Image (tube, grey):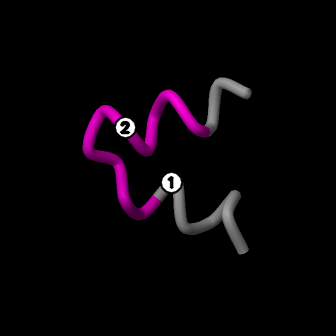
């Protein structure tokens, strides 16, 4: 769930990696 937090932080790159 930490990945989602990163995405909200503005880490589209890290979020996309996990969202994929």
Q: Which residue is mark 1?
A: 14
Disc 1: CA contacts within 10 A as few (<14), some (14-19) or many (>=20)? some
The spot of residue 17 in percent (x, y) is 63, 65
Location of residue 11 in the rendering, given as x and y in whole percent from the top left corner: 35, 48
**Mark 2 residue element:** helix
Point 37% across, 59% down: residue: 12
**Residue 9: x percent and y percent?**
30, 33
Q: Identify the mark at residue 6; answer none if there is no mark.
A: none
Whether residue 12 is in magenta: the answer is yes
Residue 9 magenta-highlighted:
yes
Q: Which mark is residue 8?
A: 2
In the shown orientation, is residue 10 left or right of residue 1? left
The quarter holding residue 6 reads top left
Q: Point out the stretch of residues depicted in magenta.
A: 4-13
Residue 7 horizontal side relative to residue 2, left or right: left
Most frequent secondary structure within the magenta stretch: helix
Quadrant assignment for the C terminus:
bottom right
Q: Quadrant of the N terminus?
A: top right
User: Quick one: label 2 or label 1, which is nearer the N terminus?
Assistant: 2
């Amino acid at each position: 769930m930490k990945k989602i937090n990163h995405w909200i932080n503005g880490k589209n790159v890290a979020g996309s990696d996990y969202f994929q």
